[in-house]
Amino acid sequence: MRILFYCQQTSARLSYILDFLGKQINADFVITSDEAFFTGTNTVRINYSSAALHANELHVQPHSLLFERSITPQKTDCFVWNNLTAFFKTGGDIPFDVFAASFYLLSRYEEYMPHEKDMYGRYAHTNSLAYKENFLQQPLINLWIQQLQQLLEEKFTSFHHYKNQFTFLPTYDIDIAYQYHHHPWWKSLLGFVNDTRKKPSQWLARATVLARVKKDPFNTFDWLHALHRQCQPKPVYFFLVAEKRGLYDKNLSPHNTAMQLLIKEHYEKYTTGIHPSWQSGDDENILKEEISILENICGKNVTVSRQHYIRMNLPETYRRLLSNGITKDYSMGYGSINGFRASVASSFFWYDLSKEQPTTLEIFPFCYMEANSFFEQHLTATQAAEELQQYAAIVKKVNGLLITIFHNHFITTQQEWLPWRNMYADFVKSICGDQ
């Protein structure tokens, strides 16, 4: 599908957002500043200028954002359009600049402005427009795109409504592969001492696992393999391979034989990526070392990542990943609340606002992490199941990409976690049955 797009000037920002939108509706935007050519060509047309040019066009009056070359505070007064939140009010057939508003959200423009950090030094979700205006739980850009397609269909009989395919992509962060097995002897001994003093009931659990009478509780990998075989999704695993333990990095040593075998097993079956440690956020050399460690274990280049604790800051984190060979990142979401951080349920390429250029780093946004439901939102497994189903429903509505995060230690058979394990199994079976 070809869409003729008239504008009096162009920019890297405009080209970027049209490229994204074109992929979403399976269309090629042909930009022209020739008014006679635009009005004289009988095709699907969008006029992106202040004045109407033709009776048969979709007219969108532009906001200034896409033609600016600086990062400055923007007025984002919100209003309701077709039951959806909108901002950057202008005029024409659509009462706001859907292209500029989409760019604002997708580029994470607001994260480049001065803002408060949360307790982990991350961009606090409470700063975001989506949170303040209550659309964090919506893939708003995808919903806008649906409305745009509908308007084009009404204007042009030659325009065919394109539907993406709904996709469920389960992902897993392996922060601590085993609770008791394969740890250094001194750590196991210290664990027994602490159990005796603080958790006597856990002493027996540790002993039976180390004696190989029972399976390690965190070893849920075979269970996940069976679940995947039954439902046939294409999961992605992220391994934490910090060499030095820290306050937030408590993984097994990447030089541990059992750990290396586990990583190799997953690399052979699934997409496997790096889970850059908390420490690597302070030192790019550590990031390089961790990627190198994972590459040596796998025997191949590592190009996929997700930040541990979702510790990221723009543009520094993404630039570091790019300079270290990462081409796909799954960190776009909040580690403090579930929702659509970039207001989208589709992958997209990161636009480096500071350099005013698109990049080759493809971003895969997640909207749900079980740790947010439990630790931050204080939900029960039953309530979390309802929340997860709500996200699935809205992503299905836009035929988008549903990415979830679970941890191996959250889906164990231990009494306190068994409801979460059952909830997740039921969800995966139901969602895969609908695809």
Image (cartoon, grey):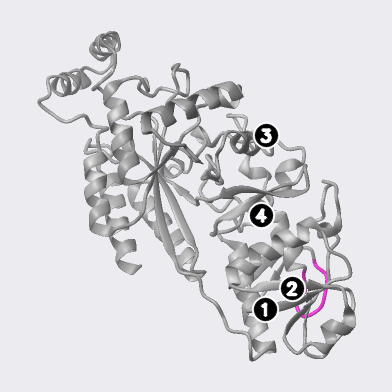
The reply to whether the magenta stretch includes residue 170 is no
The residue that label 3 is drawn on is 316
Density class for disc 2 (Cα within 10 Å; few <14, some 14-19, many ≥20) is: few
Density class for disc 4 (Cα within 10 Å; few <14, some 14-19, many ≥20) is: many
Density class for disc 3 (Cα within 10 Å; few <14, some 14-19, many ≥20) is: few
Tag nearer the camera, 1 or 3: 1
Secondary structure at numbered mark 3: helix
Vertical arrangement, residue 159 with respect to residue 262, above or below: below
Q: Mark number for residue 2? A: 1
The residue that label 2 is drawn on is 30
Q: Mark number for residue 106? A: 4
Q: Are marks 2 and 3 in contact (CB under 8 Å)?
A: no
Q: Residue furthest front?
A: 299
Lower position in the chain sequence, tag 1 or tag 3: 1
Vertical arrangement, residue 272 with respect to residue 422, above or below: above
- Residue numbers of the magenta segment: 89-96
Tag nearer the camera, 3 or 4: 3
Tag nearer the camera, 4 or 1: 1
**Residue located at (80% from left, 67% from top):** 89
Q: Are marks 1 and 2 in contact (CB under 8 Å)?
A: yes
Lower position in the chain sequence, tag 4 or tag 1: 1
User: Can residue 210 be spotted in the picture?
Assistant: yes
- Distance CA(mark 1)–CA(mark 3): 37 Å
Secondary structure at numbered mark 2: strand
Lower position in the chain sequence, tag 1 or tag 2: 1
Q: Amino acid at mark 3?
A: Glu
User: Can residue 179 be spotted in the picture?
Assistant: no
Q: Looking at the rendering, which quadrant does residue 297 occupy?
A: top left
